[in-house]
Every structure is written in structure tokens, then in C-alpha cells.
């Protein structure tokens, strides 16, 4: 498992769209596995689960994105998982880290452009 979290300011819909487009277009095998959206007053929460094949590990890896926003106050949590080939402990987490890096770069670019 690899994890990235960031608090930033911006537009909820814009960042969610950038993440979705960037993750899907970042790999020919990437697709959205599931999604959930919730709103409570002015607080919004979007959860996206992506999956792709990792040639590095020879298996599939998942990336879970949670975006929470209230006005222009945003919080992103991205967690990647899978890809390890060991039975009792994790080895070869390069696929997880690579998938997470895609989301990290999108959020960092967005944060710096504001």
C-alpha cells in the first residue's frame, strides 16, 4: 500500500475531472472500477476506485481516490494497493507506487496552478 494526502484550495468539480481524466489516460489498461458521491449541506465527498495492469509486477493494482470539499477547501486522499507477488509479506510494490504517482502529480500540478 502506498498513500498520498493533500489539503489544498480549488474547485471540487475541476479537480475531480482532472484526476479522472489523468488517471484513465495515464495507462491503456486503466479503468474506473466504481464510484460514490455524497453531499451533506455544502460538504461534498467523491470516492473513485481505479484499476490497471502493472507490467512491473505482472498483476493488477488499484487506486482509491477520496476527494472531500467544502467551498474551495479541498482534501484528497489517494491509496494504491495490489501488485505484490508474495504470500505473507509485500515485495515489489513498484506498480502501486507508480499508479499513485499519477494521482500525486495531478494534484501537485493543480495545487501549484492556483
Image (cartoon, rainbow, N blue to C red):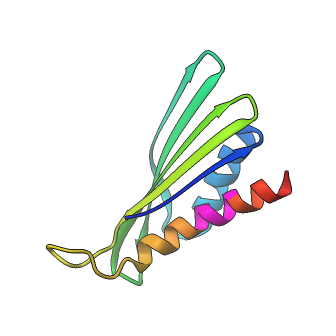
Residue appearing at x 50%, y 63% in the figure: 30
Quadrant of residue 70 within the rendered picture = top right
Quadrant of residue 68 within the rendered picture = top right
Q: How many marks?
A: 0
Residue appearing at x 71%, y 46% in the figure: 8
Quadrant of residue 109 within the rendered picture = bottom right
Q: Position of residue 54 (x, y in %)?
A: 41, 76
Horizontal relation, residue 109 to residue 23: left or right: right
Residue appearing at x 67%, y 40% in the figure: 74
Q: Position of residue 93 (x, y in %)?
A: 37, 77
Horizontal relation, residue 3 to residue 12: left or right: left
Residue appearing at x 60%, y 28% in the figure: 44
Farthest right residue in view:
114
Q: Is residue 50 above or below residue 88?
A: above
Q: Is residue 95 above or below residue 4?
A: below
Farthest front residue in view:
7
Q: Position of residue 47 (x, y in %)?
A: 50, 40
Q: Is residue 83 above or below residue 78?
A: below
Q: Position of residue 87 (x, y in %)?
A: 15, 74
Residue 106 counted in the magenta span: yes
Q: Main secondary structure of the magenta part?
A: helix
Q: Is residue 74 above or below residue 24?
A: above
Residue 48 counted in the magenta span: no
- Quadrant into which the N terminus falls: bottom left
Farthest top residue in view:
41
Query: Which region is colored magenta?
Result: 102-107
Amino acid at each position: 500500500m502506498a498513500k498520498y494526502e493533500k489539503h489544498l484550495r480549488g474547485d471540487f468539480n475541476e479537480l475531480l475531472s482532472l484526476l479522472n481524466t489523468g488517471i484513465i489516460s495515464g495507462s491503456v489498461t486503466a479503468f474506473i472500477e466504481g464510484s460514490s458521491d455524497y453531499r451533506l449541506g455544502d460538504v461534498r465527498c467523491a470516492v473513485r476506485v481505479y484499476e490497471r495492469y502493472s507490467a512491473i509486477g505482472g498483476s493488477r493494482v488499484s487506486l482509491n481516490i477520496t476527494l472531500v470539499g467544502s467551498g474551495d477547501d479541498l482534501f484528497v486522499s489517494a491509496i494504491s494497493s495490489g501488485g505484490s507477488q508474495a504470500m505473507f509479506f509485500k515485495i515489489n510494490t513498484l506498480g502501486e507506487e507508480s499508479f499513485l504517482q499519477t494521482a500525486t502529480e495531478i494534484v501537485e500540478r493543480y495545487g501549484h496552478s492556483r
